[in-house]
Image (cartoon, rainbow, N blue to C red):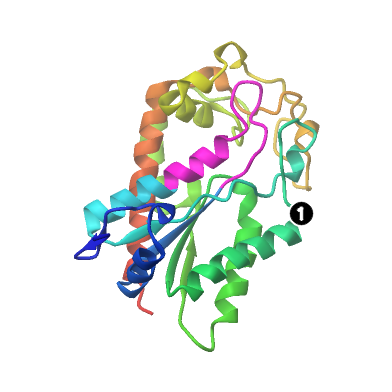
Amino acid sequence: MPHAGGQFVNLLWGENTWEDIAQAARDGAIAVAPFGSTEQHGPMLPVDTDIHIADRLALDGARAARDKYGIPVLVLPTMPFGLALHHMSFAGTVSFQPETYVMAIADILRCVVKHGFRRIAVVSGHGGNEPALRLGIEKVVHEFAETMPLRIALFLGHRDPVFAKLSPEIWRGEPSEGQPGIHASRWETSETLADRPHLVKRGRMVRPEMKRTTVPEFDWRTQEITETGAFGDPSLARAELGEKCWDAWAEAVGQFIKRLADEPL
């Protein structure tokens, strides 16, 4: 049996049969849809960094929601490509065009809805995906608005209220990076050191020379700000900081799923 009292043995969508998934929908399970990106992460991190982040956010959060709150959850396979046009000058980056990506998001979510799921938690490992994710979600919600109620929510990442509350304790006493740490910086490098240290080129964990002191207001390309593709100061990264980050993400995504489960249809 794939489920017992609403608890599914296989959290991963792809490890279940079609009958298991149909039953999960009838039992009111929440579908978690992770979206990643294949893009450069400086000279020290692999290009699948944002895929791995999306994987862990979704699976760790789903486990927390199941184990702490008894919520039945299924985690879809992570979409490995996203919006990364600003990184295209760096080898290895693969990006959708914005309009293509919005349609792909809507297609994925539409399929999940048509299989009977009414609550979908969307998580992203790449902040640049957010505008398209919001549009894709809105497209699907309004498409079904006249026939069925849906609750599709996007996890806000660093702006999530639970993560924002936990975050200061992670960095308490840590020196400032001295420049915007928005990508391939201390936090992503620390997370990778914590759970995939063999993929980090430690000799390349260096503070990049930035061409600008702040992130511009206009739509920018990465090479306009940093020659290495990294931001912040990766040399400050440590595995123990990464472990704290992963723990905080699990708690925050778990509570995000709980809030979604509590929303009436």
Above or below, comparing residue 117 to residue 168 in the picture: below
Residue 24's x, y, as percent? 34, 67
Residue at 71%, 42% in the rendered image = 94
Q: Does any portion of residue 173 appear in the rendered image?
A: no
Q: Which residues are magenta?
A: 36-57
Element marked by disc 1: loop
Q: Residue at x 62, y 44 (%)?
A: 37
Can you tell which quarter of the image residue 21 is in?
bottom left
In the image: residue 118, left or right of residue 178: left
Residue lying furthest left: 5
Viewer-proximal residue, 109 or 137? 109
Relative to residue 21, is residue 64 drawn left or right?
left
The image shows residue 234, relative to residue 225, as above or below, that is above
Please provide percent x and percent y for residue 249. 40, 43
Tell me which amino acid carries mark 1: Gln
Depth check: 136 or 113 in front?
113
- Residue at 27% x, 54% y is 9
Q: Residues within 10 Å of mark 1 (few under 14, many from 20)?
A: few
What is the tally of numbered marks visible in this picture?
1
Question: Relative to 19, does residue 229 appear above or below in the rendering?
Answer: above
Is 4 rendered above or below residue 166?
A: below
Work out whether residue 234 can be spotted.
Answer: yes
Mark 1 sits on what residue? 97
- Magenta span has 220? no
Looking at the rendered image, the quarter that the C terminus falls into is: bottom left
